[in-house]
């Protein structure tokens, strides 16, 4: 399989040269200096490495870059626009939903995917969408409140 030479990340084409068998996480962090996605378990179980590929959350630690080379990739770095936080980022700030914050970007990206498909999720919908993302500090109630706040902000048009 030929080397991957470009990726569409956060709406822009990024040049690189990568073995297609490398993980998306290693390419994002090591080659492109996009460090929001974190290495957690390395097995796709904790969610710290979650990014969106064509709008769906994926575990970048288990995703081969060659498998997604033609798809649109979004990372937490692409959420803020013109100095304005994305509503879910604002929700996380307002709900104080970060303790150590290692897991935060993964939760944020899973939340973005949910809110883009369902802008008015129930508590159960949020729990289902975030299931599989692990917060070792245990701030789950604040994370839930953050996604609920983001949904309210989206409804208000902010």
Image (cartoon, rainbow, N blue to C red):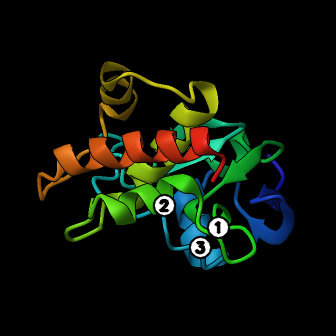
Q: How many tags in the picture?
A: 3
The reply to whether residue 46 is in sight is: no
First in residue order: circle 1 vs circle 2:
1
Q: CA distance from mark 2 to mark 3?
A: 17 Å
First in residue order: circle 2 vs circle 3:
3
Looking at the image, which residue is at 51% across and 49% down?
109
Q: Nearer the viewer, residue 9 or 140?
A: 140
The residue carrying mark 2 is: 89
The residue carrying mark 1 is: 80
Q: Secondary structure at mark 3?
A: loop
In this rendering, would 31 be left or right of 14?
A: left
The residue carrying mark 3 is: 34
* Mark 1 closeness class: few <14, some 14–19, many ≥20 residues within 10 Å: few
Q: CA distance from mark 1 to mark 2?
A: 8 Å
Looking at the image, which residue is at 47% across and 47% down?
150
Q: Nearer the viewer, residue 22 or 122?
A: 122
Q: Quadrant of residue 85?
A: bottom right
């Amino acid at each position: 399989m030929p080397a991957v030479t470009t990726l569409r990340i956060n709406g822009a084409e990024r040049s690189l040269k990568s073995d297609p068998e490398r993980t998306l996480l290693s390419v994002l962090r090591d080659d492109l200096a996009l460090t929001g996605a974190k290495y957690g378990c390395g097995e796709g179980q904790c969610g710290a490495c979650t990014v969106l590929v064509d709008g769906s959350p994926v575990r970048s630690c288990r995703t081969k870059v060659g498998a997604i080379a033609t798809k649109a990739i979004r990372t937490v770095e692409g959420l803020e626009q013109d100095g304005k936080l994305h509503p879910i980022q604002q929700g996380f700030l307002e709900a104080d939903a970060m303790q150590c914050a290692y897991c935060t970007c993964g939760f944020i990206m899973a939340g973005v995917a949910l809110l883009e498909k369902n802008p008015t999720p129930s508590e159960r919908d949020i729990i289902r969408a975030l299931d599989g993302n692990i917060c070792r500090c245990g701030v789950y109630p604040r994370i839930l409140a953050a996604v609920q706040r983001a949904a309210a902000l989206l409804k208000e048009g902010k």
